């Protein structure tokens, strides 16, 4: 399987229906075991198994033979392989495999912030983002806050730092269905708006998903794990 230059393959998988193979490293299983809930523990194991099988298909190696290293802020990288990023919520998993530079992806269920959207935005949104919310009808604000959170997560993960990047330091658009990049400003990087792209992904109706990548242009191809011949 080949990844074209400038292509980002976005893989979807339903973790509850995917098989778990014995390909994880001991440290991966140990991290999964931190989950108290048995279903969540299984999903964590399954997500790493799916990740390994997909990446293995790109580099031509068995899933168990892949080697990963961890960047300073915890983002995993595949030795001698493409950039990638994974997110899962419940049984829904998204994996972005990039031929267009660094990549970050996030997926969250709709309603995720309904009970605490005010607290989340107060702690993690920029002043400009909170001003966007103030201009919206009250009924639209929880969903807009979720869109903002997912977009900010994807961008911060693409930058390689996650929450450590400082969520209030950059601003994303909160409107729905907007064309173009969702990144408005990054106080830490004057060239970010021109050098990075932040886009919404096609997701099931009950989810919101976004992707960020460090390339001026890219082609997004959607793939399903069910079609991967193992």
Image (tube, rainbow, N blue to C red):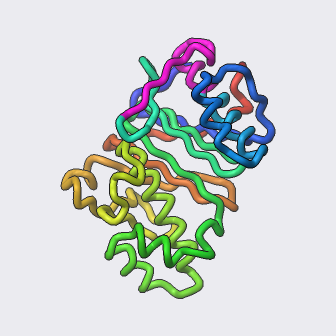
Using the rendered view, name the quadrant where residue 226 is placed: top right
Q: Is residue 221 above or below residue 19?
A: below
Left or right position of 195 against 209: left
Q: Which residue lies furthest to the left in this view?
A: 190
Considering only vertical position in the picture, is 172 above or below 131? above
Q: Where is residue 168 in the image (x, y as percent from the top left)?
A: 34, 65
In the image, residue 86 lies at what x, y percent?
55, 40
> Does 209 sit left or right of 161 as displayed?
right
Return the x and y of residue 128 as percentages of the image width and height.
32, 75
Residue, x 27% and y 55% (percent of image)? 193
Instruction: Report if residue 177 is visible in the image.
Output: no
Residue shown at 32% from the left, 48% from the top: 196
Residue at image coords 69%, 47%: 92
Relative side of 77 to 91, left or right:
left
Instruction: Magenta stretch: give its range.
Output: 52-71
Pick whichever, 1 or 59, lies toward us. Answer: 59
The spot of residue 101 in percent (x, y) is 36, 35
Residue 169 magenta: no
Eyeballing the image, is 24 above or below 114? Answer: above
């Amino acid at each position: 399987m080949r990844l074209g230059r400038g292509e980002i393959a976005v893989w979807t998988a339903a973790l509850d229906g995917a098989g778990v193979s014995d390909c994880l490293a001991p440290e991966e299983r140990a991290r999964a075991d931190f989950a108290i809930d048995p279903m969540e523990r299984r999903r964590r194991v399954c997500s790493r198994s799916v990740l390994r099988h997909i990446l293995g298909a790109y580099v031509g190696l068995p899933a168990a033979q892949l080697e990963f290293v961890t960047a300073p802020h915890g983002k995993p990288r595949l030795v001698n392989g493409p950039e990638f990023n994974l997110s899962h919520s419940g049984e829904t998993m998204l994996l972005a495999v990039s031929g267009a530079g660094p990549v970050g992806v996030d997926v969250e269920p709709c309603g995720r912030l309904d009970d605490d959207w005010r607290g989340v935005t107060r702690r993690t949104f920029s002043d400009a983002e909170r001003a966007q919310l103030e201009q919206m009808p009250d009924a639209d604000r929880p969903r807009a806050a979720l869109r903002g959170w997912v977009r900010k997560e994807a961008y911060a993960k693409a930058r390689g730092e996650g929450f450590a990047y400082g969520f209030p330091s950059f601003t994303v658009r909160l409107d729905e269905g907007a064309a173009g990049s969702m990144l408005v400003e990054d106080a830490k990087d004057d060239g970010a708006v021109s050098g990075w792209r932040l886009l919404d992904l096609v997701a099931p109706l009950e989810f919101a998903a976004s992707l960020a990548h460090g390339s001026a242009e890219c082609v997004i191809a959607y793939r399903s794990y069910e079609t991967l011949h193992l």
